[in-house]
Amino acid sequence: MEESRHRVCVIGGAGYVGSSLVKKLIDEGHTVHATLRSLSEESKVGLLKSFAGADERLKLFEADLFNKSEQIEQAIHGCEFVFLVATPTPQARRLNVDAIVEGVKNVAYACSRCGSVRKLIYTASTGAASPLKEDGNGFKGVMDETCWTPLPLPFHHCDHSLGELKDYIESKTLAEKEMLKIGNDEGLEVVSLALGVVGGNTCLWYCPYTLSIFFSQLTGDKSGQSSLKFVEDLLGKIAVVHIEDVCDAHIFAMKAPNGSMSGRFLCTNSFVSAAEIANYLRQNYPEFNLNLRDQDCSRCMMNGPEGQVVLNYEKLLHKGFTYKKSWKDVIDDSVSCGRRFRHL
């Protein structure tokens, strides 16, 4: 793989994954164009500019996935690689599925028009790779890159407050399909990395939601627990990945020689149940007395979906990628962050 330095663009540079990726790219000596929805958001701008080397290797651009495509074109101009990380989350409450899909398509077409872009790396979600059968009657035996979440979702979750999470899954599924199609039609090399639920540590000044759900059973946070249960109902278990492996996988995809790595890859190396997470927390953090906290929800968490699904994540490994972190590292680092931010 090439070890030269590149000019890259991270669309969505201030979120959980985006900020960590920007920091690592700068640390490796790459020149980074990072987009934010607004350059007037001092906390986000200040965070990115605080990274070591940012003065020399970081340029910020104002660009919104939903607005003028000219903004995106300005940001990616002169860049060899584009990372499309940005996507509204259920917590952002901007979930217009059609608008999200259209925004993703605009980025892909902008990369195709730009003569400098060699590869587009898209941050997808394992939520779009559910092994649910089309009729919703159970799961396929294996979850891998051939799985696509059937739409509309063929199950009804007991927690009606998760409607926005369902919209998120729909938008990620449709957007990833469009991204891969455009790449094929336009001759644009696209790598789609479908992330599991991301946890670990963070360079942000607050605790990201996906990180916090890993210790939601300690805090009694019903929203986080419901999200865990939703993912388990969707996938059979919970696909988990550490933020450090996520960043490494994105940069690995960038460095892979053109033509050697394209298409869809699951980016997750762990597949655990909510009960397994609860048991690990109970055994390793006894000071929280998990057995006595929110027992109604605890009983719900122990009842996972019927049947066994096996996660096959070997496709990325066969390209030479190596994961450094386990799901237990994800839990431990997430709990450490929770303590740092005084959530625990």
Image (cartoon, rainbow, N blue to C red):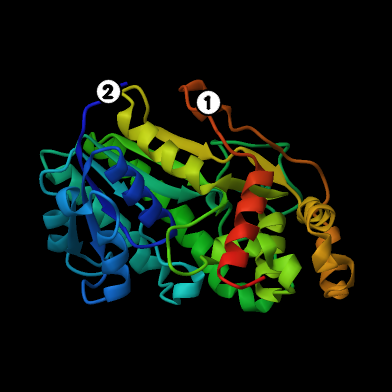
* Earlier residue among tags 2 and 1: 2
Q: Determine crowd level at label 2: few under 14, some 14-19, many 20+ residues with C-alpha closer than 10 A.
A: few
Q: What amino acid type is highlighted by mark number 1? A: Leu
x, y percentage for residue 69? Answer: 17, 61
Residue name at image x 28 percent, y 34 percent = 189
Instruction: Find residue 2 and name its label.
Output: 2
x, y percentage for residue 54? Answer: 22, 53
x, y percentage for residue 99? Answer: 34, 68
Q: What amino acid type is highlighted by mark number 2? A: Glu
Residue labelled with disc 1: 317
Q: Determine crowd level at label 1: few under 14, some 14-19, many 20+ residues with C-alpha closer than 10 A.
A: some
- Camera-nearest residue between 25 and 167: 25
Residue name at image x 45 percent, y 37 percent = 264
- Camera-nearest residue between 171 and 220: 220
Count of numbered badges drawn on the protein: 2
**Quarter of the rendering containing residue 147:** top right
Instruction: Find residue 186 and name its label.
Output: none
- Camera-nearest residue between 331 and 120: 331
x, y percentage for residue 314? Answer: 57, 27
Residue name at image x 43 percent, y 68 percent = 205
